[in-house]
Amino acid sequence: MNKVKGLKKHLNVLQETAYAEFGSALEMLSACKLSKKDSFCFGYFHHSKDEYNHTKTFLSLLKKYGQTLPSDIAREFRFSSNAVINKGYVSSKGFLVETMKLKNFIAYVYTNELLAKESFEGILKMLKSDISDAEKISLIMKDELRHHGLAEKHFLKYYPRLQPWQLMAYRIKETIQNKGRKLYFKNLQFLDKVLSPLYSFMANIAGLILTYLNLNEFNRNGKNLMDISTKSII
């Protein structure tokens, strides 16, 4: 039982990370499409490609470890592209590059790539028993550090007056938002557990009421509509 519980925890981490990487891929692809400079477009495109590859890696790990669980439990960890919005990894109001100033968007990339690298350190410890899987995570961590470094170079080139404390403020802000996103989804899960039985109960009551309704009132075959009572529901 404890083994299954521990494996479910691991699967949850892999699934959430896959959503985060997929969300990042979409954000970078959107930035690529809206870029006005060829160099920016090229950079965002390759960043997006990396994030898609990361998503593919985590989905493969999710499948690998999910196969060891009963199908009814493994089904809970199916990947759905729509969930990237429900979980808050992509806003329903639009992509970040559409709602942020370019400087703030680069700051978002700068801070989140570093935060991602730190979270992967935990995943690396989680998968350390499998050398092959650990190597995959290590390669992803190198990509995240490279993305972080590219964003830093962008700052130094285009915003030379930006102070280190401002970047730290961006990082604190993103850390809080990440925590808030997780709390938001946990609240949704809690409400689902509470409200689902209520909805089921209401549906059963409605079905029971319908069984006692006299539906003959709806049968108009062979009847003159002019003779129907004005009090009729039709």
Image (tube, grey):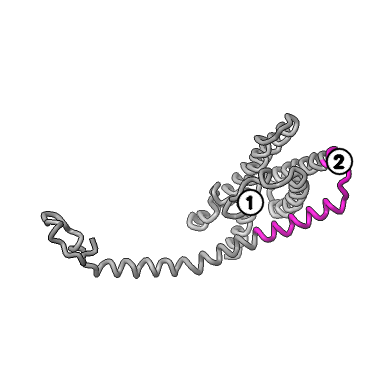
Question: Between tags 2 and 1, which lies in front?
Answer: 2
**Residue 199 in picture, x, y percent from top left:** 43, 66
In the image, taking residue 35 as reference, residue 201 lies left or right, namely left
Residue 33 appears left or right of 118:
left
Q: Within 10 Å of the Cα at label 2, are there few (<14), some (14-19), or many (20+) other Cα atoms?
A: few
**Residue type at tag 2:** Leu
Confirm whether the magenta stretch covers residue 89.
Answer: no
**Residue shown at 19% from the left, 64% from the top:** 230
- Residue 44: give x, y in percent of width and height: 71, 36
- In the rendering, which numbered label is found on residue 156? 2
**In magenta segment, residue 167:** yes
Label number found at residue 89: 1
Give the quarter of the figure containing the N terminus: bottom right
Residues packed near mark 1 inside 10 Å, few (<14), some (14 to 19) or many (20 plus): many
Disc with the residue nearer the chain's start (2 vs 1): 1
Residue 228 in which image quadrant:
bottom left
**Chain part drawn in magenta:** 155-181
Determine whether 109 is above or below 171 in the image: above
Q: Is residue 180 left or right of residue 148?
A: left
- Tell me what residue is drawn at x 23 percent, y 60 percent: 234
The image shows residue 233 at horizontal and vertical percentages of: 24, 64
- Badge 1 amino acid: Tyr
Q: Position of residue 80 (x, y in %)?
A: 54, 49
**Residue sitting at the far top:** 38
Q: Is residue 60 above or below residue 200?
A: above
Question: Foreground residue, 83 or 35?
Answer: 35
